[in-house]
Image (spheres, coloured by chain):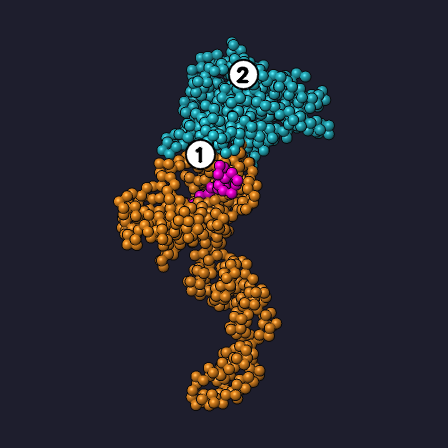
Amino acid sequence: MSSAADILASSELLAKYEPVIGLEVHVQLATRTKIFCACPTRFGDPPNTNVCPVCLGLPGALPVLNRRAVEMAVQAALALNCRINRVSRLARKNYFYPDLPKGYQISQYELPLAEHGHLEIEAGGAGRRIGITRVHIEDDAGKSVHEGFRDSDRYSYVDLNRCGTPLIEIVSEPDMRSSEEAYAYLTELKQTLQFVGVSTCDMEKGHLRCDANVSVRLKGAGEFGTKAEVKNLNSFRFLREALDYEIARQVAVLEGGGAVEQETRLYDPSTGQTAGMRTKEHAHDYRYFPEPDLLPLEISEKWLETIQASMPELPAAKRKRFIEEYGLRDYDARVLTATRPLAEYYEKAAAAAGNPVEAAKWVQGELLGRLNAEGKEITESPVPPEHIGELIRLIAEGQITGKLAKEIFPKMFATGEAPSKIVEREGLKVMGGGELEGIIDEVLEKNPTQVAQYKGGKKTVIGYFMGQVMRATKGQADPKQVNQLLRKKLG
Amino acid sequence: MDVAALTIDRIREDLAARRYSAAELATAALEFAQAENPKTNAYLHFCPERAMAAARRVDERLARGEDPGPLGGVPVAVKDVILTKDVRTTCASRLLEKYVPPYDATAVARLEEAGAVILGKTNCDEFAMGSSNENSAFGPVRNPVDPERVPGGSSGGSAAAVAQGTAVAALGSDTGGSIRQPASFCGVVGVTPTYGRVSRYGLTAFASSLDHVGPLARNVRDSARLLQVIAGRDPMDSTSAFAPVPDYLAGLDEDIRGLKIGLPKEYFQDLATETGDLVAAAVETLKGLGCEIREVSLPTTEYAVPCYYVICTAEASSNLARYDGVRYTIRAEDAESLIDMYRKTRGRGFGAECKRRIMLGTYVLSAGYYDAYYLKAQRVRTLISRDFQAAFEQVDALVAPVSPFPAFKLGEKIDDPLEMYLSDIYTITGDLAGIPCMSVPCGRTADGLPVGLQILTNHFQEPLMFRIAAAYERAAA
């Protein structure tokens, strides 16, 4: 727990209370173009270049809803086990801000795209189902730039490239009871959405943004306490720190005889604290009303079926299948389904190897470790999954030993070459037949004392011979075969 | 040539006969309009370069032996709430005084593709809010019939230009009667098409669910010609209709014998006036043309004005939020904070009527009031639409007055907003129902003030509406 939180309330005090947390998560959909116009959603272009009359909110411009954005939002909602509203409505959310050129955001209010979903999470060793109230679509605002200009002391600048980027907002039920659960929920949410391919969920680029509604109540109390909305939780670490701080702050307020105020608070990562932004009296009245420029959004049976058919297997289902079909342990299945490309990689490797358990070991142990060390994604792996399969087959066929394979793998990783090629070039084949027998005979001849000991009943001395033979073959012999030959020759 | 007497048919003939070129016509029309404009202030500004370029394109087509387009060479005016690329579009507001849009409204682009020559941009009430054109930041428009009187509004400049002869036809916009009422006040034809029939792309939004772009012209045929060109699906406007556009000229010469015409009785109460008499005479004319006249009832009419002023102000409060000082013409540079900048900019930039409507609209959408006002108004709107549907089961079309009174004097109603709002009492229902409706001149009062007859038909029944209007126009001539 962060030190900022420790100062506020002791763990004894905290233990008296139960936090109640709900998250509002904004996710940028990975469409190529914006939600109401054809401008690109590309990140990092010069300011105010990816704009047109529609996303600039010029007089007379009208929105036209991006079909692909709706499909992605429906995919996300289906992945979150939501019920899709066959007719939903876009609505205007009115507020003034310099980076909001229309003076309103086009969002959804009554009749959102989807409702009544849930997500299964695991926190503290126990599984929990977190309810999802709603998923709705909306457009993003632009970006105000307050620093970096010569006259930044007097003016702010506005970049409208991001304006009109499609977002979904995913509102959870207040079902989380600790920062760990909130962390697990956000993790599962991110993984699920990445799996479906509707968003990169890149928090650094703002593709995943999180606000939290937090309250505390005495354990066993029936009613919720007054909640505060905490904003700016834009990394997993910030989420946990901010929640821990806010929980401790509210406990301290209540223990001090005060009352928690309903307000919006901003998390400051540099102090680890939350601070009040505006209270309820100053809360925005967004004056929502149905967007008259857009017709009600209808999702036909046929369209919904098409979208459903396009859904990939979701992480939870995939985990289950990996355990049942491939005989993986729960932990391994979890690791290998962390992302869709990783799961796909693993399945290819398993198929090529003809041995899913061995493939899991190699992918997790050798490959992921090396990728992590180089900060690479699975998609950037220099080793294709077929090569891992081939390596496992070479071992199974007795052509190389496991020990040899471990020496070959770094070379595969460095060069991208197939293991068979490396084996051939470096002459790493397993030594067998007459050559191996000759070496064994030689070792036995050189060590008459130990031979005598063995014959005298001290069978453990075979370990000594093994070592000698392996050293003499430079590890190119199959230990199993060496062991068999030794026993035969020693009688 | 007598520019003020031209019709579209006449121009087509003259250009085909090479009596003058489109460029010559444009030059003459511009000269005439610029010379006449001080009398009415109908135009806010002219766009001679754009006009001459358009005229030259028409002449090039003619020189190549091609058709000059359905509106080839026709000098038109465009209400200044409709965007024209590279030509100032002010919405008659200080807030957009210097605003030059980077794109054309779909209706404007279609006019020019059809060969029309846009002379300039016409005055109107600020952001199309008003019924007298007195809410323009750039001075009122005077009615060409009587300069002491208003031309109606909000498309007062477009109606005045057509009546004055400084444009053969014009584009206006209608949210609660803003085409039909000024058309009736100035004695020209004004058409509000079915909602969704003409793209709103490039029409500065006042109340999106009620805004229409439509034509004003000196006769029914010309108005139909303009609508023919600007109507049709536009992928840039999600609310524009997919229904194919029929030939609006085809039925214009047909008789109207046997048509059932309904008179909504609610529109004829309290109409023991000259306006009432003129409309009654027009009804007699229709009867004489073989129409069967029936009284019908639109019982929810009495709720139309409050319903309209809740919905249109709600939408306006949102649509006008973008004029916040961050962009466009005006920004209060003496502001101490962002909020202060918003307040000062908008406080100084908007005229009284816009402010009134923004405040009303903000109020009716506020938390705690939404259900009582906005939601209820939407329900009333549905009832009003149902009234019309029920009426159209009994009759083919409805006729009614356009306005309870003819053009009033400048300043007469400007200090009494409620009285002003009531001048739209017969026109806002058509907008609320989204049905096509038009004003066709039906005579003048003893003072010489024009009065309009309103014809309303069911959704997409513009051909029937034009047919009745044309038959009446012929009979009344």
Residue A153 is covered by the magenta coloring: yes
Going 52% across and 13% down the picture, which residue do you hit?
Answer: B148
Look at mark 2 in the image and give the residue it sits on: B142
Whether A310 is drawn above or below B364: the answer is below
The image quadrant where one finds the N terminus of chain A is: bottom left
Going 44% across and 30% down the picture, which residue do you hit?
Answer: B343
Report the span colored magenta.
A134-157
Residue A445 makes an appearance in the image: yes
Spot the cyan chain and give its letter.
Answer: B
Depth check, mark 2 against mark 1: the one in front is: 1
Of the image marks 2 and 1, the number of the one nearer the N terminus: 2
Q: Colour of chain A?
A: orange
Task: Compute the Cα span from label 2 to label 1.
Answer: 41 Å
Which quadrant of the figure has residue B42?
A: top right
SS class, disc 2 = loop
In the rendering, at what x and y percent does residue A32 appear?
55, 46
Tell which subunit mark 1 falls on: B
Whether A260 is drawn above or below B371: the answer is below
Look at mark 1 in the image and give the residue it sits on: B337
Q: Nearer the viewer, residue B306 or A201?
A: A201
The 10 Å Cα crowd at callout 1, few under 14, some 14 to 19, many 20 or more, is few
Residue A39 makes an appearance in the image: no
Residue A154 is covered by the magenta coloring: yes
